[in-house]
Image (cartoon, rainbow, N blue to C red):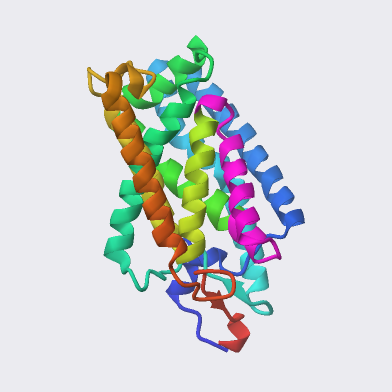
Amino acid sequence: MARLTKKNYTFLNRYTYYIPTVADLFILLVWFIAGILLANVITLAFAAAGSAAREVSILVAYPIMFLPAMIYASYKSQSNSMNKSGVKVDSRNFEPKGAVLCTALVVIGTLALGFCSDAITSILPEMPEWLEDMLSSMTQGTVWINFLCVSIFAPIFEEWLCRGMVMRGLLHNGSKPVWAIIISSIFFAVIHANPWQAVPALMLGAFFGLVYYKTGSLKLTMLMHFTNNTFALILGNIDSTKDIESWREFIDGPEYWVYLGVSVLLVALIVKTFLGLPDKHEKGGMDPVPCLFEQ
């Protein structure tokens, strides 16, 4: 038996031996809903303490939403580790392009796809005022609080759930790659709970899923998520862009369509590049791991 090392218990490695089946995903969803309810209770408790506490409450409430599901998944992984093989939540299969080029491509692709998704969300009905105020508070409030929640917590926790658990579980329990990507993207869209966020989440989720399938790198999809959210946070704190609802309001006439065309072309080329990466394993770029008893 392999000697247990600290590496076995790092954040992402501790979930290696939990590969959720469809039934397991429903259980995981129940734990996630329980976390949401607990987070709402905490938010209400903070709200009763005053406006300053209410703003800070999200720093506590946001991680709490995912905590029950993460504890459950960690427990199941530890239970499975002695008699079942696993699949890494985070691998590093970037060849032959290399990590640096892959990183540059996904950052560019994320920004370009965000611009493309804006063309679709711009034709949706006008956003309700209460939702607009809520989303604005996430980008135009206290900068350090918003940065932690929007740029750090969201990429880590949402990618862990949507790609690391949902997509990885579907892929390694018999689903075809395209369906694993699509279903995890739909799940990603649904947890955003409104069409103005769900539409770009669906598009970005499909791109994130492709990259995760080909490289196995959850850290790379976290970076993509970070890029998208931080760019929105920056725009929300610039006077000339913080109140615009669509790039069409900011870029006039033919220039908008030129930018849109370039963005579509960039996304297509980058998607083609990742589709061209060889599959290191039968199920893509995620590395299989034997059970601890066999190591």
Camera-side residue: 101 or 11? 101
| Residue 193 in view | yes
Task: Name the magenta segment's main secondary structure.
Answer: helix
Residue 48: image x %, image y %?
Answer: 51, 17
**Rendered position, 190 above or below 105:** above
User: Left or right of 74: which side holds 275?
Assistant: left
**Rendered position, 176 above or below 283:** above
Residue 17: image x %, image y %?
Answer: 61, 69
User: Left or right of 157: which side holds 223?
Assistant: left
Q: Residue furthest top?
A: 129
How many discs appear? Answer: 0
The magenta stretch spans residue 131 = no
**Rendered position, 188 above or below 276:** above
Camera-side residue: 203 or 221? 203
| Residue drawn 53% across the image and 87% down it | 2
Camera-side residue: 160 or 57? 160
Residue 58: image x %, image y %?
Answer: 45, 31
| Residue drawn 45% across the image and 21% down it | 122
User: Left or right of 278: which side holds 189?
Assistant: right
| Residue 150 in view | no
The span picked out in magenta is 167-196
Residue 71: image x %, image y %?
Answer: 60, 54
The magenta stretch spans residue 176 = yes
| Residue drawn 22% across the image and 17% down it | 239
